Amino acid sequence: MPGAFEGETVTRRRFMTGITHGAGAVAAGAFALPAIGFALGPLFEEKEVPWQDVGAMDSFPDDTYLPVTITVTEGIGQAGRSTAYIRKRNDQDTDKPDEYNQFVAISTACMHLGCPVSYKPAAKRFICPCHGGVYDFEGKVDGGPPVRPLDRFYTRVVDGRVELGKRYSVNRELRRFSPRDPGEPLDGIGQFAYPSRPSIRKIPGT
Amino acid sequence: MPKLKLPKPPVPPNLQPLPPRPGTANGGDGPLDKAKEAGATVVDWVDERTSLSGGARWMMFRKVPKGTNWFYTLGSATMFAFLSQAVTGVFLAMYYDPSPTNAYESTRFITNEVFLGEFVRGMHKWGSSVMVILVFLHMARTFFFGAYKYPRELNWIIGVVLLILTMVMSFTGYLLPFDQRSYWATIVGVNINGTGPLVGPFLSDFLRAGPEFGATTLSRFYAIHMLLVPGLIAALIGLHLYLVAKLGTTAPPWMKAESDPELREEQK
């Protein structure tokens, strides 16, 4: 082979070029990979959601909602606070009863793009101020652009006090799904087009 | 004597400086003569060691086609809008605090307490709209004049990337005052990103640094807004300008190529 000594399969020039490129790639990777991992880390880290006390059992009616201020993210002041609408379960509720929905807790994030909805007792409906989304008493879509019913929170009763836990999403039949962001439908192909994320999951088996 | 010859400014002859009287100047060694030459000497010193003047001349003294008009200044106008954003942004960063509990308070402090704070913040705020408008006008000029065609396609592509980066700047900068409007606009914007199938949910997790608007969302937006994207924009503007100088500008579409008068006679 020209440019190589006897028995060599690679010329020295080629070998040096390869080594230099390899060293450059190692040096660049040494700072690029940790930086990318640093930025992407939160995508794979499950967020801890503690149970929070929201009031005594008998303070919640079953025919209307009571707004309760909850903490979604701790340590960031008012920006981490939100509102949940809570009531006692009644016999008109269509979702499957279990230990986590004896009290119905509705999230205020509109399922169109996340604006805060408010409950209008006179109309028995949730109304979104941004783009006119309307939900019925159970949080199912009544009109406007939202793609699925309002998200809910797990609730449980401990010593006569109602506690509120993780958020979960529901489809049109109020079946539980791991929390999705607003604007992501869960009926039909939607549940596959918008996969659940490692950063937040529903309670397994519910 | 300086070797560098700068072009004479186009002033009328009777306003131009008189030529030196024979025997006095032009090689005079007095301190006044030296002071007069000081600027050119310094430039010479640098140029001898870097050869930068060739590049500067290549960039500055270009031939432009007949019919070049005011529409051709929209690109530089956009660049100066960007420079204005960069400079005011750097100085706003001296007072701004990207923490969820202090961001609004520090913005209020800039607006109400800092000397010229409202003015500099206003320049940055309104300048961002000016920059977006200029980007689109510049793009429209390029499109309607057909200036995206061969051999300038790559410059159009770089321009589109710059447009997207400008949008990223607008999106990330909108959160920083951290008032009600910023907060809810960002919630909505992140959720719009989330509606992309398959990757959307992960993209919105990336933007928020987690499943909910959290403690590091604001600092993440701040880092993207003031470090990551401006660096990319500056680098791409450099490349964009290099290609403009390399390829030259186009004549407006209404200009006809002039042919030889004799040839024109023959074609009749």
Image (tube, rainbow, N blue to C red):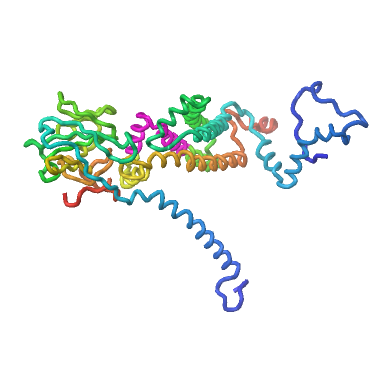
Residue A44 versus residue A131 in the image, above or below: below
Q: Position of residue A128 (x, y in %)?
A: 25, 29
Question: Which of the 4 quarters of the picture holds residue B252?
Answer: top right
Q: Nearer the viewer, residue A194 or B87?
A: B87
Q: Position of residue B101 (x, y in %)?
A: 37, 35
Q: Which residues are magenta?
A: B163-192
Quick one: quadrant of the C terminus of chain B? Answer: top right
Q: Position of residue A79 (x, y in %)?
A: 33, 35
Q: Is residue B50 magenta?
A: no
Residue furthest bottom in the image: A7
Q: Is residue B178 magenta?
A: yes
Q: Position of residue A154 (x, y in %)?
A: 18, 43
Residue furthest left in the image: A91
Q: Nearer the viewer, residue B141 or B230?
A: B230
Residue A186 can be seen in this image = no
Q: Nearer the viewer, residue B50 or B16?
A: B50
